[in-house]
Image (tube, rainbow, N blue to C red):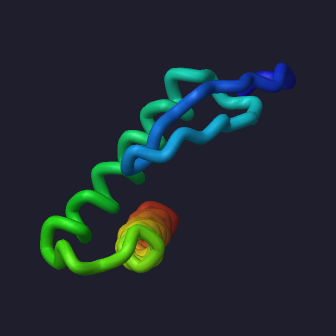
Amino acid sequence: MSDKENRVKIEIYGQPYILKGSESPEYMKELSKYVDEKIRQVQSRNPKLSLDKAAVLAAINIADELKKLKADYEELVRIIENR
């Protein structure tokens, strides 16, 4: 991560956005691609969902992934510390 602010044009579910941040443009594009894929997965399971609802459900799925990964990480740290 650098102190320089980068701007990158991305598209999520057909909607254009401009991301600003200190991460590399490649990283921001990678994140936006992941979010787009998650929304499309949700939408493919229920095509009648609005984009807003699909985005919220995708966010919940991503939050679930993050929470489980954090729990796994904390468990691994605990195992390592107790050796």
Please tell me which residue is depicted at 66% across the width and 35% down the height of the picture. Answer: 18
- In this view, which residue lies farthest toward the left? 45
Rendering coords of residue 70 (x, y %)? 47, 69
16 versus 75 height, above or below: above
78 versus 32 height, above or below: below
Q: Give the image quarter of residue 66.
A: bottom left
Q: In this rendering, does residue 83 appear at all? A: no
Name the quadrant of the N terminus: top right
- The one nearer the camera, 56 or 13, is 13
Please tell me which residue is depicted at 52% across the width and 30% down the height of the picture. Answer: 27
Name the quadrant of the C terminus: bottom left
Left-right relation of 47 to 23: left
Q: Please give the count of numbered marks on the rendered protein.
A: 0
Please tell me which residue is depicted at 41% across the width and 52% down the height of the picture. Answer: 35
- The one nearer the camera, 52 or 7, is 52
Rendering coords of residue 46 (x, y %)? 17, 78
Please tell me which residue is depicted at 67% across the width and 37% down the height of the picture. Answer: 19
Q: In this rendering, does residue 63 appear at all? A: yes
Rendering coords of residue 14 (x, y %)? 39, 44
